[in-house]
Image (cartoon, helix red, strand yellow):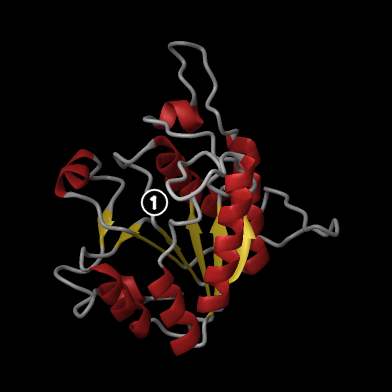
Amino acid sequence: ELKVAPDKGVTDTINYVNQLDDLQTVLYIGAHPDDESNSLLVYLNRKLGIDCIYAVANWGEGGDNAIGSELYGALGALRSRELESSRAFDSSQQMYLGAYDFGYSVSLRESLLGDSETNSDGIYVIDVLGYNFAKVIRSVRPDVLFSSHKAPNTDHGQHRAIGWMVEYGIDLAADPSYVIYDDNGNELAPFQVKKFYTRPFSSRQIDAYPDQITSVGTASSLNPVDADLNMD
């Protein structure tokens, strides 16, 4: 079930978190090294004592560099060290989902799903990324999953792809027929994420995808409905 928090930023998200019962572990998934919410991770970990993990899809090696000469692999190495520095600040664990940053993309078809009209594949491989996403979820077993990305969106292709893969990975992780092994070759037990929160949609997106979006609360997290806070 896709849950969308109101558009009041990290403060409103924190209001939700404060009302969740027995929250122990949070997984935050983003496409690039700058797609996490450091303020949220700091609050969850340092204030509430919740175990937090940021899983990044790629190292951002396909981006620009306005302050240095590093590009491609060298830029990815630099940005991976920046993530290490951020984790030292917010005390979260850093994980990697096994993708690469191939540069800017304008569509979900190009980045992930492929195009049947041109008989072309997406750059990312769904089966590979799906396994990696589900493996991370089953490994850390988060009560709540956060992401900066969402499935139906108008962002660039990699963000669209990761938003799509987050929901797919949640489903795979909970599927008892889907087999995943840890790094030691032991089978990981299925796990169902209790809540998934992402950034808010525009009214245009909500109108375009009415069956895919459930808006959380009516006005703000200060007045949530029971289903928003139920961790069962």
| Residue nearest the viewer, comparing 144 with 176 | 144
| Residue nearest the viewer, comparing 221 with 160 | 160
Count how many numbered circles sit on residues in the image.
1
Residue bearing mark 1: 149
User: Do we see residue 30 in this rendering?
Assistant: yes
**Quadrant assignment, res 92:** bottom right
Indicate the amino acid at tag 1.
His
Residue at 39% from the left image edge and 51% from the top image edge: 149
Say left or right for 192 vs 160.
right
Which structural element holds mark 1?
Answer: loop
| Residue nearest the viewer, comparing 132 with 80 | 80
60 in relation to 23, above or below: above
Residue at 45% from the left image edge and 50% from the top image edge: 67
Query: How far across and down, in percent of the image, does residue 85 sit?
Result: 56, 69
User: For the N terminus, which image quadrant?
Assistant: bottom left
Query: How far across and down, in percent of the image, does residue 232 sit?
Result: 46, 74
**Quadrant assignment, res 82:** bottom right
Residue at 67% from the left image edge and 64% from the top image edge: 139
How many residues crowd around disc 1 within 10 Å: few (fewer than 14), some, or many (20 or more)?
many
User: Do we see residue 175 in this rendering?
Assistant: no
Query: How far across and down, in percent of the image, does residue 156 sit?
Result: 37, 38
Residue at 24% from the left image edge and 74% from the top image edge: 225
Query: How far across and down, in percent of the image, does residue 78 sit?
Result: 59, 54
